Image (spheres, rainbow, N blue to C red):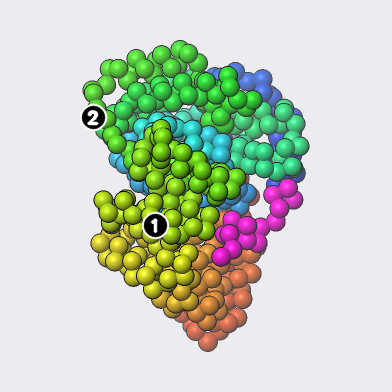
Amino acid sequence: MIDIHTVNRRPLRQRFSNGLAALGMGLLLGGTPLAAATDDEIRLPELGDSSSALVSRAREKELGQMWLRMFRSQVRTSNDALLQQYVERTLKNLAEYAPLEDKSLDVVVVLNDTMNAFAVPGGVVGVHTGLFLFAENEDQFASVLAHELAHLSQRHYARSLEAQRNSTIPTLAGMLGALVLAATAGGDAGIAAMTATQAAALDNQLRFSRKNEQEADRIGIETLAKAGMDPEAAGEMFEQMLKATRYYQRPPEFLLTHPVTEKRIADAKLRASRMPDVTPRNGRDYHLMRARIRVAAEATPQQAVKRFQAELNGINDNEDAARYGLALAQIAAGKPDSALDTLQPLLDKEPDKDAFVLARADIDLARQDYASATSRLQRALNKNPGDHALIMGLANAQFKAGNYLAAERILAKHSRVRRKDPAVWYLLAETHGLAGDIVGVHEARAEYYILNGVFDKALQHLRHGIRLAKNDYQTHAILEQRIKDVIKMQEKAKEL
């Protein structure tokens, strides 16, 4: 199938680089230059009008959703349902122990091998796939997420607005520009052509004061400990980042906006030492997800096969993950029989594990044994109802088998549960088309484009759908209302 991240999008160079450069220049020319600001004078994103004291939580949520749509329109995001589910579950677990008033979060996984994570007012949390390559275990990975949740829970953005209400404060566009710049690092000539000064100005949109960072460190470490994870992982992760400044030309993106010093590492270790001891976690699921990303990060599947074969026969962080990674690499290299031999010991131990069932189904699909793939996934789903990765896996298998009506039923139901998941709507649109529901195609594609901030395309599809549904009063009314919604979204997008 077509990669959902490349469909109907103008090149990033045309869509964004000029606007981003102009934004950078505007920040430099307007008021006090950001690059000259001290830590306590950092200009943070504006979330409400300048006359308000603290922006309301409802307003934060509204702007956060709009920001997320705009962000998705500019970067490549993951459509790996298993990976998405893992990050969502990890954040949900941490959020239960974080002092967040609103624990509902929107998670975006960015396809970029740089080490970065971020949180945006309104409960949006982003993770670069490179964070998995950088963090050596689940606790280190979670320490970064807990830190970002701490910024959200303490409303550092809104509190900074209160302290600087008489200042000229950039809007969320500054944050959008900075995070898009980080998410497309090295991937686009237009953005690469930006001057270092402009890039530095945009980086400053994400910086917090030293006091904010200290508070986020403290709360993040407390959250880790309460969640039963190793609080020492925060200090370990800081050490990893500090090492990166010595061995790499460019330090991790996260480090650019969260500066790390020896003192900060020492403070994190001291704070962690005061926490109750925790039982070490296996963290195998993290290593499985890391293996998925490492397979994709290799230049070719054949290279991935060699790397994981060497790890399985030698030193590895987790033997199951090394075996799993090798099986995935063998599938990608067109060797399903070898993949089955590699995967079988994992299936023997845990026949209902979603990651292993999905890999086994991929072997079936590679052999074009669609009946086995669909029946295998259906049995697993019966035992794990509601598992997002299994649902998407089954829908994809039915789609590849040519069972379009079955795939359509699965996805139509799932779209009501995951209304804000672009990958669900994209596959549903494709399935509607092959099942003969043309109105459904336009409706699903419109939802996909809405979630990706491409409002002109969304309106086109909604208007096509209305013309085709002229004799269906209910559908016609739904699409008419959706057009009104999108027009409002377009207007609100200007606020960024």
Please state the horizontal and vertical placement of residue 402, each as a whole percent of the image.
48, 76
Where on the picture, by quarter, is residue 216? top left
Please tell me which residue is depicted at 53% across the width and 87% down the height of the picture. Answer: 471
Q: What residue type is labelled 2?
A: Thr
Crowding at dot 1, Cα within 10 Å, few <14 / some 14-19 / many 20+, comes out as some
- The image quarter in which residue 175 lies: top right
For the residue pair 283 and 180, the one nearer the viewer reads as: 283
- Dots 1, 2 in contact, CB < 8 A: no
Q: What stretch is highlighted in magenta?
A: 1-14
Residue 148: percent from left, percent from top: 44, 34
Q: Give the prevailing secondary structure in the magenta stretch.
A: loop
Q: Residue reaching furthest bottom?
A: 471
Numbered tag placed on residue 340 in the rendering: 1
Q: Which of marks 1 and 2 is in front?
A: 1
Residue 43, compared with residue 90, is above or below; it is: above
**In x, y percent, where is residue 99?**
33, 34
**Real-space CA distance between mark 1 and mark 2, rounded to the nearest whole angstrom:** 34 Å
At mark 1, the secondary structure is: helix
Q: Which residue is drawn at 67% across and 29% down?
A: 201
- In the picture, the disc for residue 5 is none
Q: Is 63 placed left or right of 353 in the picture?
A: right
Residue position for label 2: 279
> Split into 4 quadrants, where in the image is the N terminus?
bottom right
Answer yes or no: is residue 111 visible.
Answer: no
